[in-house]
Amino acid sequence: MPDKPTTAAGYAPDQLARVRATCLYLATKLGDLMDELIVVGGLTPSLLIDQEKLPSDVSPHVGTMDLDLGLAFALVGEQRYQAVAERLRAAGFEMDTNEEGNPTRQRWRISDPPVKVDFLIEPDEPAAKPGRLFPLTKDWAAIIAPGLHLAFQNNSLVLLEGKTILGETAQRRVRVCGAGAFVALKALAFHIRGENKDAYDLFYMLRNFGRGVSEVAEQFRPLLPDPAALRAVEHLRMDFLDFEALGPRRVAEFIYGRSDLNLQTDVVEFVRSFLEETSP
């Protein structure tokens, strides 16, 4: 899989709309199975934060290159994953390939240029390794994502309407990771892989969701003392509370392509406020 762009400049303006249209199309095809799938990853901020009503000093979210869908582990236990795979194929999705041309069982694609869909899961197995593949069928797998269960505890239904990736007019409600769980998942992911985009997504949510940091903290507090949420708090303290720490530096690198003291200080202050509002 090619690395994600390390700066905002690498994200095409129309890609977010195409990913959103793919999500809407999937919702029309998976129907009753959508209750056991949840939108996570880079599409989430634009679904939770109205991009048409941003303050004048706030830039729109840069979007995402692909669609990340979390799978409830119950879906696997009931072996309903076979139905998902069958519907994906019937809807025109095909398995993606890597740079060597080999199939990637966890990633599917549709349209040209392609929009890609990654599936994530959190097995109930202590030895499960983050980033590894969890086999679902002989030709379908999901990426192991620590803390994914938090998204199934903190989420909301969001109305998607407009054109699908095939140009159809439609509207469906999709389950989307909540702001509190999103911050936790991004903190966990950033600590594991250190991607600039994860740091940016985390900061964007804290800065722009709802009434501010207090509303994100309000959604996060019920997730405590879940061990995954506690780990996320530890990672935020380690990676985001100094303006020269990894988190603030990589937010600045993503937005400006270089360090920026003012922005890095803002990142620290937003994370510090969040941690103060979620501490016992």
Image (cartoon, rainbow, N blue to C red):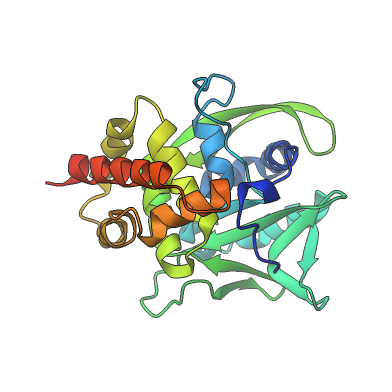
Quarter of the rendering containing residue 219: top left
- Residue 144 vs 13, above or below: the answer is below
Residue at left 40%, top 61%?
246
- Report if residue 80 is visible in the image: no
Foreground residue among 274 and 82: 274
Q: Position of residue 140 (x, y in %)?
A: 68, 69
- Residue 114 vs 62, above or below: the answer is below
Foreground residue among 50 and 262: 262
Is 192 on the left-hand or right-hand side of 131?
A: left
Q: Position of residue 200 (x, y in %)?
A: 49, 48
Q: Position of residue 93 (x, y in %)?
A: 80, 54
Residue at left 70%, top 69%?
1
Residue at left 18%, top 43%?
276
Is 274 on the left-hand or right-hand side of 264?
A: left
- Report if residue 236 is visible in the image: yes
Foreground residue among 16 and 165: 16
Count up the numbered dots.
Answer: 0
Q: Residue furthest toward the left?
A: 280
Residue at left 52%, top 22%?
54
Q: Position of residue 157 (x, y in %)?
A: 50, 32
Is 277 on the left-hand or right-hand side of 261?
A: left
Quarter of the rendering containing residue 228: bottom left
Is 245 on the left-hand or right-hand side of 100?
A: left
- Residue 54 vs 225, above or below: the answer is above
